[in-house]
Image: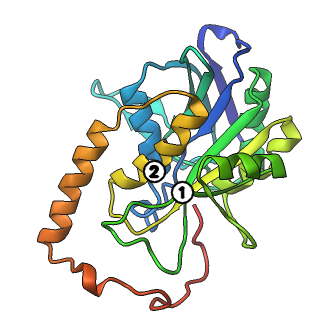
Amino acid sequence: MWKYFEIENGKEQVYTHNPLLIISLSTSNPQYILLYSQARELGSYLLRKQKFDKIASFYSSSLPPAIQITEKGTLELSGVSFFHRFNGKRDIVLLSGHSSPMGDEYEFSDELLAFAQRIGVRDMVSIGARWSEEPTPPLEMPKVIGFSSDEDGVEELKALGVEIQKEESAYFFANTVVGLAQKYSMRGFKLSVNHGEPRPHPKSIMSFLGVLSKMMREDIDLSDLQSSSQELEKAIRSAGYDTSSALTPGSMPQQQGDIYR
């Protein structure tokens, strides 16, 4: 795996206010991008609504082979970036960017978690969507489900109102990075929603932020998401969606294959 870390100002800083790492990367696979873009949207929303400073960028051959062409006709490599803010109570480190890795996911996770460990992170939460054989109805507020790397973490999620995910497999980067957290002296959490809401997923992002705001120990402005949700509801209803004909439990056949992102 080719890799390159770029540290802002050339120096890593150690954070001491119980830093929380939020990993908010989504797949760029065209087959799944519309269903599973919630994490990317969440990262973008936090960067728009709050003051973060970029502290590092990471480039890797495990990311999609793409470049970004600027307005001036020059190019930038597509990568992922770490951002930091201190909210007066806790250091928040956000990992956001172009895409989750398309291969070498353990090696990619190793680079990210090793960096996070060096800057003092002890808690990390990965954001993503979870496949459900019965999609969440598009007008319904998705519930947040999740798991943790240890039993104390599970109890913490329960106290936050998260439904605990049990007895199933969980695939790909958003999940495996949580599985590696303890190897880097971190407690790992995964937060998911079942797909079903059309993109841009405002209800899903509000559900995530309802839990994350408690973990971050700060209130987050949801007004833009609320407006977007109302507009999306109108569009869905005007398209002829009938809530009375929505899928009933057990009415959708189980799918198999490449379904977790």
Name above or below for residue 78 compared with residue 226.
above
Compared across the picture, whether 40 is left or right of 187 comes to left
Q: Quadrant of residue 124?
A: top right
Which numbered tag is attached to residue 99? none
Relative to residue 251, is residue 161 drawn left or right?
A: right
Q: Secondary structure at mark 2?
A: helix
Q: CA distance from mark 2 to mark 1?
A: 6 Å
Q: Nearer the viewer, residue 32 or 19?
A: 19
Q: What x and y, as percent, mark residue 43?
A: 47, 38
Q: Helix, strand or loop at disc 1?
A: loop
Left or right, residue 211 beside residue 150: left
Residue 245 lies, in percent from the top left, at 28, 87
Q: Is residue 66 visible?
A: no
| Residue position marked by numbered label 2 in the rendering | 207
Of residue 111 and residue 160, the one placed in the foreground of this image is 160
Q: Is residue 121 above or below residue 12?
A: below
Circles 2, 1 touching at the beta carbon (< 8 Å):
yes
The answer to whether 13 is drawn above or below residue 21 in the figure is: above
